[in-house]
Image (tube, rainbow, N blue to C red):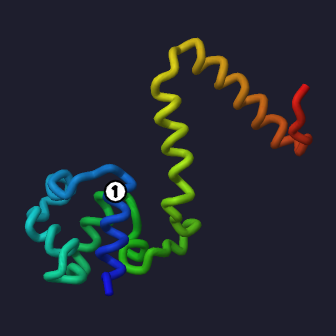
C-alpha cells in the first residue's frame, strides 16, 4: 500500500507543477533523498525534513502526512482541475478581453454578494 506521505507529496508536486529537482533546490535536501520518499525505499522523512518540505511547498506537515489540513478545506485535486483549465484559457486572452471579463466578474460578484438571482437579461 502506498504511503500517505508519498502520495500527498507526489500530488502536491504535481499540483504545483514542481519537479523533484526544483524541490531539492528549494529545500537543500538532496534529490536522491527526496526520490527515496517518493519511491519504495523510505515511506516518510524525519520530522525536520518533513517541515522543510512542507515549508517549501507552502503546506502543513499535517497535510503531507494525513492528506488533511485542519486549517483548510481538504484538497481535492479533481475539484481544482476545472480552475486550472480556466487559468490556461485566460492566459491566452488579450488585454481588452481580460478587461471585459474583469467587469463581468465584478458584476457577478456583486450579484452574489447581494444574493440576487443569476438570470440572463
Residue lying furthest top: 96
Residue lying at 8% horizontally and 67% vertically, measured from the top left = 32
Where is residue 6 drawn, in percent x and y?
29, 75
Q: Which of the pair 56/102 is nearer the observer?
A: 102
Q: Which of the pair 59/16 is nearer the observer?
A: 16
Which quadrant does the C terminus fall into?
top right
Residue lying at 37% horizontally and 58% vertically, measured from the top left = 58
Say above or below: 57 vs 34.
Answer: above
Q: Which of the pair 88/52 is nearer the observer?
A: 88
Which quadrant does the N terminus fall into?
bottom left
Where is residue 22 drawn, in percent x and y?
19, 51
Where is residue 54 drawn, in percent x and y?
32, 66
- To which quarter of the image does residue 116 belong? top right
Residue lying at 15% horizontally and 68% vertically, measured from the top left = 35
Is disc 1 placed on a helix, strand or loop? helix
In the drawing, does residue 82 fall left or right of residue 8? Answer: right
- To which quarter of the image does residue 83 belong? top right
- Residue placed under numbered mark 1 in the picture: 14
In the drawing, does residue 6 fall left or right of residue 77? Answer: left
Amino acid at each position: 500500500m502506498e504511503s500517505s506521505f508519498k502520495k500527498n507529496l507526489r500530488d502536491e508536486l504535481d499540483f504545483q507543477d514542481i519537479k523533484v529537482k526544483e524541490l531539492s533546490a528549494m529545500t537543500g535536501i538532496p534529490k536522491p533523498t527526496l526520490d527515496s520518499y517518493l519511491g519504495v525505499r523510505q515511506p516518510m522523512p524525519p520530522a525536520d525534513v518533513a517541515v522543510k518540505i512542507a515549508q517549501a511547498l507552502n503546506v502543513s506537515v499535517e497535510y503531507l502526512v494525513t492528506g488533511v489540513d485542519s486549517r483548510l478545506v481538504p484538497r481535492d485535486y479533481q475539484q481544482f482541475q476545472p480552475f486550472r483549465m480556466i487559468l490556461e484559457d485566460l492566459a491566452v486572452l488579450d488585454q481588452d478581453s481580460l478587461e471585459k471579463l474583469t467587469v463581468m466578474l465584478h458584476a457577478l460578484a456583486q450579484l452574489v454578494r447581494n444574493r440576487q438571482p443569476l438570470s440572463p437579461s
